[in-house]
Amino acid sequence: MSPKTIYDKIWDAHVAHEAEDGTCLLYIDRHLVHEVTSPQAFEGLRMTGRTVRAPDKTIAVPDHNVPTTAGRDDPKNMTEDSAIQVAALDTNAKEFGIHYYPVSDVRQGIVHIVGPEQGWTLPGMTVVCGDSHTATHGAFGALAHGIGTSEVEHVLATQTLIQKKSKNMKVEITGKLKPGVTAKDITMSVIGETGTAGGTGYVIEYCGEAIRDLSMEGRMTVCNMAIEGGARAGLIAPDEKTYEYCKGRPHAPKGAEWEAAETYWRTLFTDEGAHFDKVVTLNGADIEPSVTWGTSPEDVLPISGVVPFPSDFEGGKVEAAQRALDYMGLTPGQKLTDIEIDTVFIGSCTNGRIEDFRAVAEVVKGKKIKEGMRAMIVPGSGLVRAQAEEEGLADIFREAGFDWRLAGCSMCLAMNPDQLSEHERCAATSNRNFEGRQGYKGRTHLVSPAMAAAAALTGRLTDIRELV
Amino acid sequence: MEKFENLSGIAAPMPLVNIDTDMIIPKVFLKTIKRSGLGVNLFDEMRFDRQGNEIEDFVLNKPAYRDAQIIVAGDNFGCGSSREHAPWALADFGIKSVISTSFADIFYNNCFKNGILPIVLPQEAVDVLMKDAEKGANARMDIDLVAQTVTTSDGEVFSFELDSFKKHCLAEGLDDIGLTMEKASAIDTFEASASAARPWV
Ligand code: SF4
């Protein structure tokens, strides 16, 4: 048998049908659903008299729209259109009999945080969701990717997806990271290296010592942004850390089933000599704390750098860079650490987990955020919030002057009331810095949680290594 | 879904790279539970100012391009979120084809579900088509799905690649859920053997 990558193995284990031209029906093990991209899909089922084929493999949670302030289980505290979407999810979940975590449930949170937390996401699975950051679940050695609403409907009705196989890409991060460098800096640096289209047509396997050294949470951060590099999915082979994380989760297997599962999971690695169509290697020691200056995640630089000149680029990117500089209100040549910010947003499916919050607490403990700074910290789930309360992190945040909120997507995409105002400048731990992403004409700089915390204290983009 | 007929239309030039789905349809318009009616908000933040007035120099506001059915765009069109609202908005506005050197994966797939043909061509070809599009309303571009060609107003022809299954569905306007359901027995068989092999799933 020819050697296979982990992607090849998971793919082969899920092909339910293959047509002559190579178009496959890929069987889906877990389908996650949220309120924004699903109403039209459920409506489609109703109109055609179809049902959900595997309701026990379908999990719904509202996250994008929900306010992150108290009183949100009362629809009166939501805008009317948001309330309609959340109510539609509620109705659809009940009517079609799928698993559901409403806002009133402590387990509610961002769909990509809830899945792993509840043990829905396990190694070797195929996981899809009508959301591009589904790549997050790849951290478990699952094949996970985002789909559009028509595909949501297709999966609901058939539990499969029409797919052709992607190519294999390997991203290897060798060696050890330097102090102050995090999973977020790895994933941003990779995009800086490959560009936002560098992964188009590929499924990425992240490997190497620096990836192995990461916790499961760090690995989720890395895979989360695979989509920003254009890849269909990003994944990491499971290991002891993966099993340790999964064990005992509510929906993880137990007893003899666990044993069988673990035995199977241990076969999920890339065979010696397996073929990769593209290989990117970064030396972990070369990665610096990173920050974006522009309006695309590929506009990334080490924090020690300066704002680039449009003439540093070529082709269509010259115009894009000029447009980004105008939008961001930056001057070429300006030191990144001289950029003053008004707002800090810590949260999202990239960095809204407990370890992210521990990293923030470490930086801000006993300190106060800069006067006039708006600093918002939004847990990725109700359980993350509860744990942060229990560990005393929430008190540290409140004492430092942070606004400690309820779980949801919040200012990551600003569909709820958490938004930037015009020209407000934000250091954010989320994953997208597109024009208008966090609010009309809002300006976003993507950073790690520790760097966001540092920026909250100093009022400017800050090299975390100055503070530790 | 409507069949994709051969197209002869006005092409709007959008040379910007990385046109993302937040630009195509800003999130404020995602709060709908319908698929229709999004065309008026296509490219909203680029097309209108905060008072709702048209921004004159945005390409789709120029008289020559108001009825454009084709967009010729810079690299990596449709990157970002998985929102199908992006192709819904394009289709609702009347766009039937987008031409670029590359597309983001999810957006690319979403187009076919909505009767839009995304065409990938090499940089040199896109450069020629961009120039052609810049000529305005008198320069109509022709797209032939069956022959897989784009023809400029000057008669220059470029061939493009297309997956045969996607082409078939687009040309026939097929509902792919219906097609998949015809293979229900294959799915049943797979499901039974998979749940025996991996009962924890
Ligand atoms: S946190 Fe942001 S990126 Fe993640 S699912 Fe929510 S909106 Fe999408």
Image: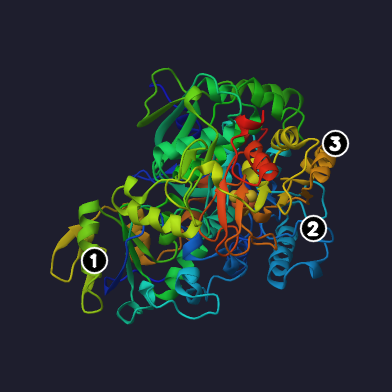
In the image, which is nearer the foreground, mark 3 or mark 2? Answer: 3
Q: Which mark is residue B144?
A: 1
User: Which subunit holds the residue at mark 1?
Assistant: B
Q: Report, in whole angstroms, how far the alpha carbon at label 3 lies from the one at label 2.
A: 20 Å
Residue type at mark 2 is Thr
Q: Residues within 10 Å of mark 1 (few under 14, many from 20)?
A: some
Q: Which residue is mark 3?
A: A392
Quadrant housing residue A425 = bottom right
Instruction: Report the side of A104 relative to B59 (left or right).
Output: right
Mark 2 and mark 1 in contact (Cβ < 8 Å)?
Answer: no
Q: Give the structural element (helix, strand or loop) at label 1.
A: strand
Instruction: Name the image quarter holding the C terminus of chain A.
Output: top right
Where disc 3 sits, the SS reads: loop
Residue A403: x %, y % from top left: 78, 51
Please state the horizontal and vertical placement of residue A43, each as a whole percent of the image. 61, 67
Q: Which residue is mark 2?
A: A69
Q: Is residue A333 left or right of residue B7?
A: right
Q: Secondary structure at mark 2?
A: loop
Residue visible at 68% across and 62% down in the picture: A416
Q: Is residue A14 visible?
A: no
List x then y, in percent, for residue A252: 72, 33
| In the image, residue A160 above or below residue A243 | below
Q: Is residue A295 left or right of residue A464?
A: left
Report if the CB atoms under discs 3 and 2 are less than 8 Å apart.
no
Gap in Å between the C-alphas at discs 1 and 2?
53 Å
Give the left or right position of residue A411, taking residue B21 as reference.
right
Question: In the rendered structure, the residue with mark 2 lies on which chain?
Answer: A
Q: Nearer the viewer, mark 1 or mark 2?
A: 2
Q: Amino acid at mark 1?
A: Asp
Whether label 2 lies within 8 Å of ligand 1 gets the answer: no
